[in-house]
Image (cartoon, rainbow, N blue to C red):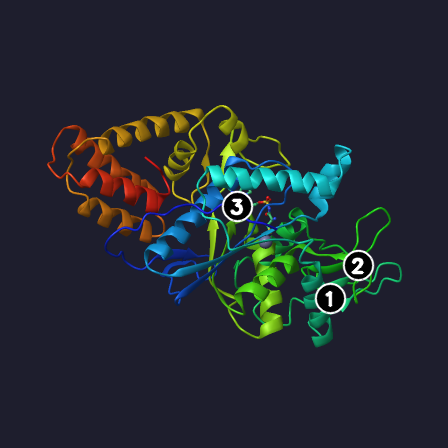
Amino acid sequence: MHTWAPVDVPRIAGEGPPLRLHDTATGRIRPTAPGREALMYVCGITPYDATHLGHAATYLAFDLVNRLWRDLGHDVHYVQNVTDIDDPLLERAARDQDDWVVLGMRETALFREDMEALRVLPPRHFIGAVEAMGEIAELVGKLLASGAAYRVDDAEFPDVYFDSSVTGHFGYESSYDEPTMTQLSRERGGDPDRPGKRSPLDPLLWRMAREGEPYWESDLGAGRPGWHVECAAIALNRLGPQIDLNGGGSDLIFPHHECGAAHAEAFTGVHPFARHYTHTGMIGLDGEKMSKSRGNLVFVSKLRSEDVDPNAIRVALFAGHYRTDRAWTQGLLDDARARLARWRDAVALTVAPPADDLVRRLRTHLADDLDTPAALAAVDAWAAQARERRGTDSVAPAAVRDAVDALLGVRL
Ligand code: 5CA
Ligand code: ZN
């Protein structure tokens, strides 16, 4: 699939500390240590509805990672998928008497527009499951051949499942106990009760074609892939056996990232698949997680159509820490607009306090597990001083504008 348009990132002088990020697998905030290339895979959307502020918050958090790594001189190799074939898409298409292909294409196009408007740096590879079908089937075939996968004993539908015991590490990424894993598997697309599986937690790799469902021909027989193997194949084939970061919202901790990691590790023998598994908190509305299935959504495109400045959306979502479950409110947006106006007033001045100290603080706070509330407070403090005319530095306004643009992606 084509990705979205590049975003200009100003170069700023100096260098910040290494980026430290929370890693779900170890439960700790640890330094990231990419090589010249930083390898990042962030799970993409399932395009059956428009991008809501929960999605936006998640992609904005990883956009900061991208920006900080670039600021440290890394060449960020960023890959993102689109789950353009899966049960939720088919169910929505059936409900609305829509064509699932058209639905997926429409919502993916809208997602690109939203990301572009939000000034999110595009992934280098933006890959749909459908276009990756050959490589996904190939990975499933290899897992089957190596004994890491098996067919259930079902004459009609001998679907292929992954044997979650083969790596010896299953459960390391989420650290959940077995009842929790079973429960989450049931809630999030798994089928722990399917008869014939070696373990209830074994995830589906290849679903043999059912009447009325789309399918693809392959050596495995006509069918379609399970969800986790899609991301494992797309990531492995572009980023290699070990990546610096596997990201997504906290609802992907299990089963999705646990299973994706297990698939990759069973195939390559390299453990851990990702040096960091980083997860964002859930954005809620009216006390509940914002989700397509609950229908309590605030769409980015709706806000855009109301002429809301996308920079204000960034500032509003950065007002909370990325790992905190938090609510979207009108008040949050109003505060962000007021904040943005104060910052814009300050950078429009001809003289201001020097930028160096603020730039150092921005880098330090963001490198500390993306502490955006502290980063925004640092800009507030500089802007307040500038507006009180407590500065004489004539290059500072432009320098701050560039730093806020480069590091936070907020255009003043
Ligand atoms: N296509 C799969 C990943 S391979 C998927 O989870 N798609 S999604 O459209 O449901 O979600 C896309 C991303 O947004 C995921 O990282 C998910 O964790 C995140 N997300 C979904 N709802 C919220 C929310 N309310 N708050 C924060 N992030 C969310
Ligand atoms: Zn994924």
Q: Position of residue 64 (x, y in %)?
A: 39, 48
Query: 199 or 388, which is in the foreground?
Result: 388
Q: Residues within 10 Å of mark 2 (few under 14, many from 20)?
A: few
Q: Is residue 323 above or below residue 331?
A: below
Q: Is residue 319 above or below residue 265?
A: above
Q: Position of residue 276 (x, y in %)?
A: 45, 61
Specify the quadrant of the image occupied by residue 223.
bottom right
| Residue drawn at the location 50% of the way across and 28% of the way down | 303
Of the numbered discs 3 and 1, the one sitting upstream in the chain is 3
Specify the quadrant of the image occupied by residue 19.
bottom left
Numbered disc in front, either 3 or 1: 3
Q: Is residue 324 left or right of residue 295?
A: left
| Residue drawn at the location 79% of the way across and 54% of the way down | 215
In the rendered structure, find residue 198 and report the number of the disc placed on it: 1
Q: Residues within 10 Å of mark 3 (few under 14, many from 20)?
A: some
Q: Residues within 10 Å of mark 1 (few under 14, many from 20)?
A: some
Can residue 167 be seen from the camera position used here?
Answer: no
Amino acid type assigned to the residue bearing label 3 in the image: Trp
| Residue drawn at the location 44% of the way across and 41% of the way down | 119
Q: Position of residue 134 (x, y in %)?
A: 71, 62
Which residue matches tag 3?
4
